[in-house]
């Protein structure tokens, strides 16, 4: 376990230190901020309303459920059980730390940013099974880059985001799978239409 944590700290120092450049230093604090993505979420909401009319309420509720479950598991259950301090609160790393955002007061493992964004991405990919391949990769890149940003700005270790990505993916997949594999739920969401975006 010690060697894994040492490797984790080393990889954190590489990403947070050696990989720093002016472009990412400017982009990443915005990119990983949930408020930055509000316009994109609004566009997605408008699209759902346009395509599915009143049924868009079901999609919004299922997305809200997915995020609620993923955030609760990460923030309320795992973080409070593991109690791993953030790297920005690790005195051994303080000298070389590149902290680009406020260091939150909560714990580090797992990253709720990674958990929630991967939960949403995998939920959408699984729910809309016939989604074009490029959109699937784009959603995964989006979630992954936001998770990576948490390490880059100095508030999470790599293992935090890897575990968060895995947890979120399982939650997103599980909730979407319940919908698509249950005939009544599937019909409620999509009717007789082919599932597509």
Image (spheres, grey):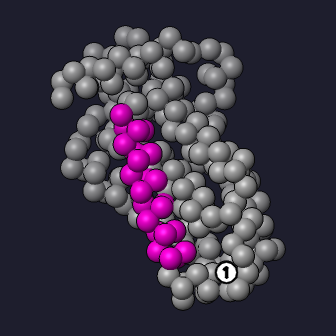
Residue drawn at x 81%, y 74% is: 50
| Drawn side of residue 167 relative to residue 65, left or right | left
17 and 120: which is toward the camera: 120
Decide if residue 37 is in sight here. no
25 and 103: which is toward the camera: 25
Residue drawn at x 48%, y 20% is: 15
Q: Which residues are magenta?
A: 159-181
| Drawn side of residue 31 relative to residue 123, left or right | right
- Mark 1 element type: helix
User: In terms of image quadrants, where is residue 41?
Assistant: bottom right
* Looking at the image, residue 46 lies above or below residue 115: below
Q: Which residue is mark 1?
A: 190
| Direction right: furthest residue | 50
Residue 59, percent across and down? 62, 74
| Direction left: furthest residue | 1
Find out whether residue 177 is within the magenta segment. Answer: yes
Disc 1 crowd, CA 10 A, few/some/many (<14, 14-19, 20+): some
Residue 149, percent across and down? 54, 32
């Amino acid at each position: 376990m010690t060697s894994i944590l040492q490797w984790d700290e080393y990889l954190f120092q590489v990403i947070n230190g050696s990989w720093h450049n002016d472009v990412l230093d400017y982009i990443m604090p915005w990119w990983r901020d949930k408020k930055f993505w509000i316009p994109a979420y609004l566009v997605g909401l408008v699209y759902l309303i346009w395509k599915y009319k009143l049924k868009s309420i079901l999609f919004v509720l299922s997305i809200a459920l997915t995020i609620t479950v993923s955030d609760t598991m990460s923030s309320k259950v795992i973080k409070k059980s593991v109690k791993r301090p953030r790297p920005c609160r690790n005195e051994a790393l303080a000298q070389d730390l590149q902290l680009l955002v406020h260091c939150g007061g909560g714990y580090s493992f797992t990253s709720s940013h990674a958990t929630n964004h991967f939960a949403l991405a995998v939920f959408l990919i699984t729910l809309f099974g016939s989604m074009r391949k490029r959109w699937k990769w784009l959603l995964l890149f989006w979630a992954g880059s936001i998770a990576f940003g948490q390490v880059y700005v100095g508030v999470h270790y790599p293992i935090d985001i890897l575990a968060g990505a895995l947890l979120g993916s399982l939650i997103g997949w599980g909730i979407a799978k319940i919908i698509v594999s249950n005939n009544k739920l599937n019909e409620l969401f999509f009717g007789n239409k082919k599932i597509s975006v």
